[in-house]
Image: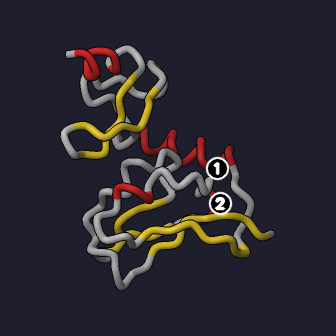
Amino acid sequence: MKRKIVRIDEEKCTGCGLCVSPCAEGAIEIVDGKAKVLREELCDGAGVCLNVCPTGALSIEEREAPAFDPAAAEENLAAKRAEGTAPRCLRCSADESRAVLLFARYHGESTWVCTRCLPVLIHG
């Protein structure tokens, strides 16, 4: 099936890892010093990762790819929770089982913030 999916230009990728955190499904990981979409069925094609790449190595392309699998994405996220690498709020450390998390840029960094802590970050 044809669908929109993240493409990573290995020539431009520096392996900085900034794209890993915004990928809520955990489709992107650093392998041998480069970002890679390890499992295409985990990539929802939303492109949240695009704007954090300092070299412009990420883009969205429409091509043949396995269908997005929400169950596999949830399973992958559960595994990341178990190993302690799932997204957490930068302020209170809540994970998705305790709070709604939103992707945010804070002090020039890509991070996650829960809806309870967001007002404090906005208003101080």
Q: Quadrant of the N terminus?
A: bottom right
Give the SS element for disc 2: helix
Q: List the residue tagged with mark 2.
A: 41
Q: Nearer the viewer, mark 2 or mark 1?
A: 2
Q: Residues within 10 Å of mark 2 (few under 14, many from 20)?
A: many
Please, is residue 4 above or below residue 42 in the view? Answer: below
Please, is residue 27 above or below residue 122 in the view? Answer: below
Q: Position of residue 117 (x, y in %)?
A: 32, 18
Q: Which residue is at 45% across, 61% downward?
A: 28
Task: State which quadrant residue 15 falls in.
Answer: bottom left
Residue pushed farthest right?
1
Label 2 and label 1: CA atoms lie apart by 8 Å
Q: Which residue is at 37% across, 49% downward?
A: 21
Relative to 120, is 51 on the left or the right?
right
Q: List the residue tagged with mark 1.
A: 72
The kind of residue on which mark 1 rests is Ala
Q: Which residue is at 25% across, 16% downward?
A: 123
Give the SS element for disc 1: helix
Q: Position of residue 61 (x, y in %)?
A: 61, 71
Q: Residues within 10 Å of mark 1 (few under 14, many from 20)?
A: some
Dots 2 and 1: beta carbons under 8 Å? yes
Residue 124 shows which numbered tag? none
Q: Which residue is at 33% across, 74% downward?
A: 34
| Lower position in the chain sequence, tag 2 or tag 1 | 2
The kind of residue on which mark 2 rests is Glu
**Colour scheme employed for the rendering of this structure:** secondary structure
